Image: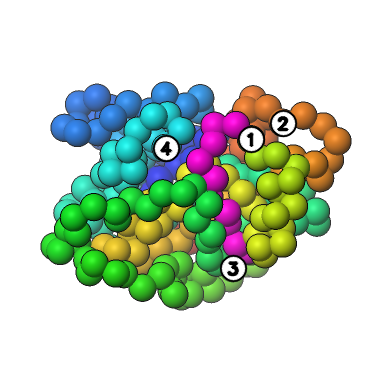
Amino acid sequence: MGIILGSGLGALGDSLVEADYIPYSEIPHFVPSTAPGHKGRIVIGKLGGKTLLCMQGRVHYYEGYTMAQITYPVRVMKKLGIQTLILTNSCGGLNPEFSPGDLMVITDHINFTGQNPLIGPNEEEFGPRFPDMTRAYSRELIALAKQAASDGNILLREGVYVGYSGPSFETPAEIRLFQQFGGSAVGMSTVPEAIVASHCKMRLLALGCVTNLAAGILDVPLTGEEVIEVAAKAGEKFTRLITEIIKRI
């Protein structure tokens, strides 16, 4: 299994045992992660009795990389034989019932980045020219995650994730639009990786940590520091849920 850890959620990678650490700088064609709260290394070790490849930090489109560069690690995982991928992120809540620190399982996404990582010549060894996205997020893994959360007495929200390019936060008008689209949370990652994972026919589970309510819902400014701080506070709950999910897969 593989897992990509989002902003402020890297502590899970430190909980792996019998671990090996490989900085992205030592891996051909990997690009450095420049976003705050991202260590920029791979950890290979054991968690919940399973061997796991963990990316402590991802790279984002807003860092100036191409879609091919930010999704390259997903294809590397596929080549390594990884069949199940867990994506995590920190996100802004679009649903006013959400609270900072809530965890959310992603049931579907809306790609509002204006880009698609599959544009260009198709890599036939990975998947078809026109991959179906109807069940990009595994219904089996969503049900497993919900049961693990229930058994662990962890509140797990669910909903649709809106992918936004960043790095500016969304405007209140954009947030109102996303709410009308049926979005539950918004963030600056995950969608490109989910598209490539689906293209590669990987089983996909995605979890978000709601670090704030999105622009305009509360009359307060948004900061990147707040995102990392709230995600770190939710780290123990997040690690406990992920560990239990991995045990059950």
| The N terminus, quarter of image | bottom left
The mark nearer the N terminus, 2 or 1, is 1
Badge 4 is on which residue? 61
How far across and down, in percent of the image, does residue 121 sit?
A: 18, 55
Q: Residue at x 37, y 58 (%)?
A: 195
The mark nearer the N terminus, 2 or 4, is 4
| The C terminus, quarter of image | bottom left
Q: Amino acid at mark 3?
A: Lys
The mark nearer the N terminus, 3 or 2, is 3
Q: Which mark is residue 169?
A: 1
Colour mode of the rendering = rainbow
Residue 127, quarter of the rendered image: bottom left
Q: Amino acid at mark 1?
A: Phe
Q: CA distance from mark 2 to mark 4?
A: 20 Å
Q: CA distance from mark 1 to mark 3?
A: 29 Å
Q: Residues within 10 Å of mark 3 (few under 14, many from 20)?
A: many
| Of the two numbered discs 3 and 4 in the rendering, the one whose residue sits closer to the viewer | 4
Residues at marks 2 and 1 touching, judged by CB atoms closer than 8 Å: yes
Q: Which residues are magenta?
A: 159-168
Q: CA distance from mark 3 to mark 4?
A: 30 Å
Q: Residue at x 62, y 57 (%)?
A: 104
